[in-house]
Image (spheres, helix red, strand yellow):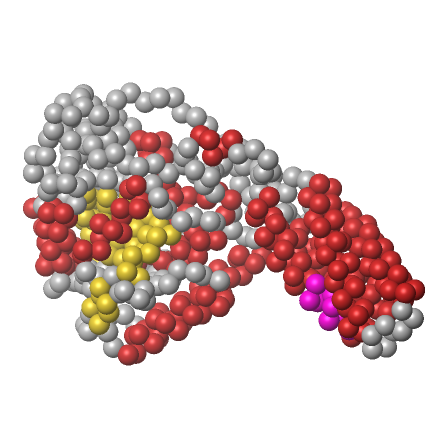
């Protein structure tokens, strides 16, 4: 499934400057509680809660004090109350009324994923994060979590309790469940990140704009689905080892959560296998240096196609050799070779069409298979000619000798097959996404006298006489134009 949205813009380092809100920056929704903010936040930390009236105030004050003392950019803490039935909403509203950097957001439906999607979508901050209300993760990991996103190096960042340098205190039951779950993700969805469930993650706003609508889950599987799709799309995920202490009073239903997660794994795996997800909308350019777009001598997509073609070819060759060995038990060498090539050729063409060159749907599928048969005939001529030459030289060669000759002939046929696939069968691959439109230059958001935020506490009067370009949220928040 392809889209016409173009690629994501190149990552940029967010400047450490602050100014009055840009004219196009959206105001907070009316159901947010809290006074208006004079400075747009660079970081919006969401704390999803459900019936947390006892711990909410203590945890938010601790998080606010930590960010005020250590975070060098404007920030906001958003308490996302998803359908609490106790006094959680009143506690959140009181904190928002007292602390300028705290806001409350009330949802009438449960679901951590629903809360995160709703608040992140409404936020104008270029960097979005969330953490569990129990603050099990050491807050000293927060700045290392978001720094790669601010610098433009990464698209998402996650805390990992399973990294070697992490220090974790929790019971054996949760430890086993967490590790088994991550093994399932690696085995079924080929996930390479180490910890999908740690409640300590961040994402760039421009990535969230396109990625979140593709995430279907509204509960605990939301994190995993978001990470799997981001990884499959080639986005960069940064992992931070964390110190983590288990909350013994956690109300999470482990059995129900595990069941829902396994259903989510099946749903996402099926969607990826059938091409239902428009992952092309998440592509990044090679880099933000203009020279990166002027690489000569390397056709677009060649490296990825070579990797895909090699993987498909390796499985096809194994299948071909196995079929040849089975057919050879009751047939002559030439007929066994032809049948093995014919069966594997159909599967090889279909796999390369779908996986290597990204062509989906039934359009021209029959034509591609017909062209694949022509390529098959060329391969058959090469391999059959090699067998004929072998039998001419040695009337009764052994099976191992026949296999060796066929492997060599197949290597030559493979190179020719790739060239024919790329130049003849699938010359364009998937329809290329159009380049993103260039927007006109925006005026400066404030005068040179705008305050400059340095490594001091937020809101502590960290002004400076320097006059660099002030922080403007518009280049990093495409959602303001929707």
Residue at the spot 11% in from the left edge and 29% down from the top edge:
464
Q: Does the magenta stretch include residue 258?
A: no
Location of the C terminus (image quadrant): top left
Comparing 301 with 278, the one in front is: 301
Task: Examine the rendered structure and indicate whether residue 277 appears above or below residue 314.
Answer: above
List x then y, in percent, for residue 168.
Answer: 24, 69
* Residue ranking furthest to the front: 393
The question of residue 319 being in magenta is answered with yes
Q: Where is residue 425 in the image (x, y as percent from the top left)?
A: 72, 44
> Looking at the image, which residue is at 35% across and 21% down?
441
* Residue range (magenta): 317-325
Q: Can residue 26 be seen in this view?
A: no
Quarter of the figure with residue 160: bottom left
Horizontal placement of 457 versus 201: left or right? left
Residue under the image location 28 percent in, 42 percent down: 150
Q: Which of 119/74 is in front?
A: 74
Q: Residue at x 43, y 48 (%)?
A: 235
Taking the image as shown, residue 14 lies to the left or right of residue 392, namely left
Vertical relation: 270 (above or below) 472: below
Magenta: main secondary structure equals helix
**Quarter location, residue 57:** bottom left
Q: Which of 411 and 104 is in front in this view?
A: 411
Q: Nearer the viewer, residue 387 or 439?
A: 387
């Amino acid at each position: 499934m392809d889209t016409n949205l173009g690629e994501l813009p190149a990552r940029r380092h967010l400047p450490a400057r602050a100014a009055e809100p840009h004219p196009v920056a959206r105001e907070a929704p009316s159901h947010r509680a809290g006074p208006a903010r004079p400075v747009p936040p660079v970081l919006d930390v969401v704390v999803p809660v459900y019936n947390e009236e006892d711990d909410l105030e203590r945890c938010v004050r601790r998080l606010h004090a930590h960010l005020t003392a250590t975070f060098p950019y404007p920030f906001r803490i958003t308490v996302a109350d998803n359908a609490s039935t106790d006094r959680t909403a009143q506690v959140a509203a009181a904190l928002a009324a007292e602390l300028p950097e705290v806001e409350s957001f009330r949802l009438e439906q449960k679901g951590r994923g629903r809360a995160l999607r709703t608040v992140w979508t409404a936020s104008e901050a270029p960097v979005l994060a969330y953490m569990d209300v129990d603050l099990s993760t050491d807050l000293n990991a927060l700045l290392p979590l978001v720094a790669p996103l601010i610098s433009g190096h990464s698209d998402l960042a996650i805390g990992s309790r399973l990294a070697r340098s992490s220090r974790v205190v929790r019971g054996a039951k949760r430890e086993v469940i967490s590790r088994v779950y991550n093994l399932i993700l690696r085995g079924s969805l080929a996930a390479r990140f180490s910890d999908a469930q740690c409640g300590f993650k961040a994402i760039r706003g421009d990535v969230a704009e396109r990625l979140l609508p593709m995430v279907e889950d509204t509960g605990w599987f939301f994190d995993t689905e978001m990470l799997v799709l981001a990884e499959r799309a080639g986005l960069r995920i940064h992992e931070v080892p964390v110190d983590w202490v288990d909350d013994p009073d956690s109300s999470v239903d482990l059995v129900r959560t595990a069941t829902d997660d396994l259903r989510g794994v099946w749903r996402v795996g099926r969607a990826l296998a059938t091409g239902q997800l428009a992952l092309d909308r998440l592509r990044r350019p090679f880099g933000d240096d203009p020279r990166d777009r002027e690489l000569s001598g390397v056709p677009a997509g060649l490296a990825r196609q070579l990797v895909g073609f090699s993987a498909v070819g390796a499985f096809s060759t194994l299948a071909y050799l196995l079929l040849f060995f089975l057919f050879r038990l009751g047939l002559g060498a030439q007929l066994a070779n032809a049948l093995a090539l014919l069966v594997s050729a159909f599967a090889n063409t279909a796999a390369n069409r779908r996986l290597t060159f990204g062509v989906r749907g039934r359009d021209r599928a029959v034509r591609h298979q017909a062209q694949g048969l022509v390529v098959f005939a060329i391969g058959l001529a090469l391999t059959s000619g090699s067998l004929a030459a072998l039998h001419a030289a040695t009337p009764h060669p052994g099976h191992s000798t026949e296999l060796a000759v066929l492997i060599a002939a197949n290597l030559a046929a493979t190179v020719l097959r790739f060239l024919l696939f790329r130049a003849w069968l699938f010359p364009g691959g998937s329809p290329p996404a159009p380049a993103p439109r260039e927007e006109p230059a925006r005026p400066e958001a404030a005068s040179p006298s705008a305050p400059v935020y340095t490594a001091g506490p937020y809101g502590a009067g960290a002004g400076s006489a320097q006059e660099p370009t002030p922080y403007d949220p518009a280049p990093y928040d495409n959602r303001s134009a929707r």
